[in-house]
Amino acid sequence: MLQFQPPGFRQKNTQTSLGTIAYYTQTEVVERSPIVFLHSFGGGSSAYEWSKVYPVFARQHQIIAPDLLGWGESSHPARDYRAEDYVSSIAEFLPKVTREPAILVASSLSGALAIRVAIQHPDLVKSLFLVCPSGFDDFGEGAGRRIPREIINTPILDRVIYAIGATNEFAVRNFLENFLFVNRDRITPEMVNAYLASARQPNAEYAALAFLRGDLYFDLSRYLPQLTTPTAIVWGEEAQFTDVRLGQQLSDLNERVQSFEVVPDSGVLVALEQPAIVAGLLQEFLSAEK
């Protein structure tokens, strides 16, 4: 999906035990101060989610923006995905693409996974900048389930639901408008096409359905108190499924969360809806970390 990346970026690939991970980085090699951007989960997700933010930092930092396994241009193994698959594959990926501990920038479920990676592998992670991080079963409340379990667990029917809900232009635009963005006027044809291109990859339904079924959910509140990595959290004021109150509850669990910023007039995809604000907040965080 290089066609959706900003100028000056190229696609590279690296192998992990679960498959090939495609990632995007500068054409001009920069090997200092790596920042790794991890996208959220949901039909059509990919590294494109951060593509309006990471070019801002390309002169000063090595930028690594992967398509996680099962998404975008990365391998799409036909498997029953679990959260542990992503924790292990991210931990395996990081030392292959960076020479020093990375700043992890992640959103939604990938933000929660990044916390687990930082806890299990503190030597790989310098700091965390997270947007709406959630395990979607935080404090034992299943915030993310939108389709009844008995329906989404029905063979064939689950594939039909995915095809109808994620692989046609009307459905993708409708979901962005009604669930992920606050202001529909900010949704561009490029955004819709990028989500469609990812959702239409062969076997893309496996990872997406694992998310919809709740197979990837976990209670982030059980992990956050263990975190020792400097962390900043940003939350879209009108994020659906995981609202601001949840974000504040989670951030209060650990004093290593140095800041909790709420971005007005934004949903959960803050990096796409308000990229300039997110870039500014990330710059402040990086400056404070020096």
Image (spheres, rainbow, N blue to C red):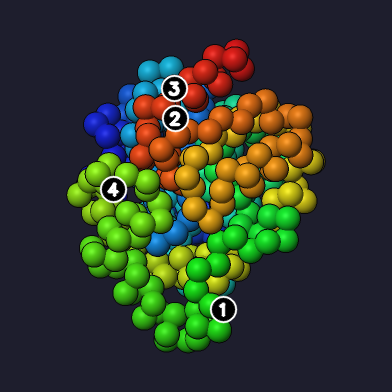
Q: Residues within 10 Å of mark 1 (few under 14, many from 20)?
A: few
Extreme left residue here? 189
Q: Picture coordinates of residue 265 (x, y %)?
A: 41, 38
Please provide percent x and percent y for residue 35: 50, 30
Distance CA(mark 2)–CA(mark 4) = 18 Å
Secondary element type, mark 4: helix
Q: Could you say which disc has been placed on residue 184 in the image?
A: 4
Kindly identify which numbered label has been placed on residue 168.
Answer: none
Alpha carbon separation for disc pair 1 and 2: 35 Å
Residue at 36% in and 81% down: 160
In the picture, measured across the screen, residue 208 lies left or right of residue 124, that is left
Q: Residues within 10 Å of mark 4 (few under 14, many from 20)?
A: some
- Which badge, 2 or 4, comes first in the chain's sequence? 4
Q: Nearer the viewer, residue 123 or 272?
A: 272
Q: Which residue is mark 1?
A: 149
Q: Mark 2 and 4 residues: CB-CB less than 8 Å, in contact?
A: no
Which numbered disc, 1 or 4, marks the residue that appears first in the sequence? 1
The residue to which callout 2 is attached is 278
Q: Are marks 3 and 2 in contact (CB under 8 Å)?
A: yes
Q: Is residue 4 left or right of residue 53?
A: left
Q: Disc 2 or disc 4, which is closer to the eye?
A: 4
Which residue in the structure is indicated by mark 3?
280
Above or below, 81 relative to 237: below
Q: Amino acid at mark 1?
A: Arg
Q: Earlier in the sequence, mark 1 or mark 2?
A: 1
**Residue at left 50%, top 74%?**
147
Q: Secondary structure at mark 3?
A: helix
Decide: few, some or many residues near mark 2? Use Cα within 10 Å; few <14, some 14-19, many ≥20.
Answer: many
* Earlier-in-chain disc, 1 versus 3: 1
Asked whether 169 or 61 is in front, the reply is: 169
